[in-house]
Image: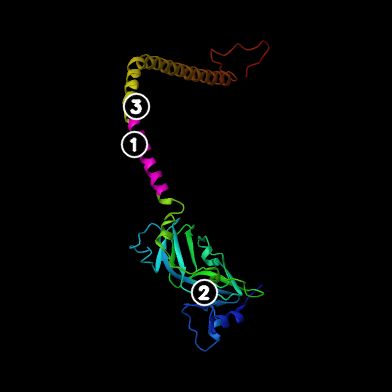
Amino acid sequence: MRLLKDDELVPLVRGANPILTGHGYDDGAAVGPWYLRQSPVQPCSIDLTVGEIFLPGTTREEDGGADHPKASHNLDRGQTAIVTTREILHLRSNLAAIGFPPSHVSFQGLLMTNPGHVDPGYVGRLRFTVINMGSQQYRLARAEQIVTLLIFELSGDCLRDWPARGYVDSPIQQTNIDALSKDFLDVERRAQKITTDAVNEAKLWATGISAVVPLLIGIATLATTLFMPGWRYDLEKQMAGIKEWTNVTKTETRVTALEKDLAAIKAATCKQPPLPEYCPPAAPGSVKK
């Protein structure tokens, strides 16, 4: 088994009995366009695009139902969709394939649950379930790339390939759509439940507070009436004592400072005649000048 590359894939897509139809790419005589970036054939893979979109949670008659598939849809976070490819495969008995989402699709949070492998001899469109696991809406639109397909050549034909075993491609049925949940992560229901619980809790708190607050106000009023007069009298009495002690202390300090100043003046005047009466008597033997 070996992986086929572009110069082997282009003849399989453009030649007689092509393995891929419905791609809408210009398959004129020129070979060059098949090796450009926009070609469905890449260096060793084939790009498949969105065809029809089916939405779980819809009825058969609604847009997105079995009878009215959508061509485009904004897939919200956590929501699911069934997508079929625009292209139709016609694999030969010696060819098998493996499909997976390209990186630029995966990086946007789109999860593909069942691309998987494609058996030899498979005929039909690919179908798969996609889930938006990203933080933003994902835009699904017809002809936009959705799957990368690797084609492998086997060592020989299968003994009994896909159609030989009785498999046939069948359109999407409403039962297929109904089997899936609209919201894979159940985001809508959980958000609604959280909101409802929060509202109910807020109502409960509001009811409790409205009953308790009057009681607390009554208790506070009673306590003020019974106890505050005594506390207030004691506090005022203590404050008056502090003020009185502070004034006395300030006066004593100032008197001490004045006494020191007076002593300094007396000492200075007693050093020369005539001596004031408050000066101490002169020592014996001293001579007055």
- Of 242 and 25, nearer the camera is 25
Q: CA distance from mark 2 to mark 3?
A: 73 Å
Label pair 2/3, CB-CB below 8 angstroms: no
Label pair 1/2, CB-CB below 8 angstroms: no
Task: Tally the marks.
Answer: 3
Q: Identify the residue position indicated by label 2 in the image.
A: 89
Residue 281 picture location, percent across and down: 60, 11
Q: Identify the residue position indicated by label 1 in the image.
A: 203
Residue in view at x 39 percent, y 44 percent? 193
The numbered dot on residue 212 is: 3
- Of 112 and 68, nearer the camera is 68
First to last magenta residue range: 189-209
The numbered dot on residue 22 is: none
Which numbered disc, 2 or 3, marks the residue that appears first in the sequence?
A: 2
Q: CA distance from mark 1 to mark 2?
A: 60 Å
Quadrant position of residue 287: top right
Which numbered disc, 1 or 3, marks the residue that appears first in the sequence?
A: 1
Magenta span contains residue 79: no
Closest to the camera, between mark 1 and mark 3, is 1
Label pair 1/3, CB-CB below 8 angstroms: no
Q: Which element type, helix, strand or loop, lies under badge 1? A: helix
Quadrant position of residue 243: top left
Left or right: 16, with 53 as reference point:
right
Q: Which element type, helix, strand or loop, lies under badge 2? A: strand
Q: What amino acid is at disc 1?
A: Lys
Q: What amino acid is at disc 2?
A: Leu
Q: Where's the C terminus, which quadrant? A: top right
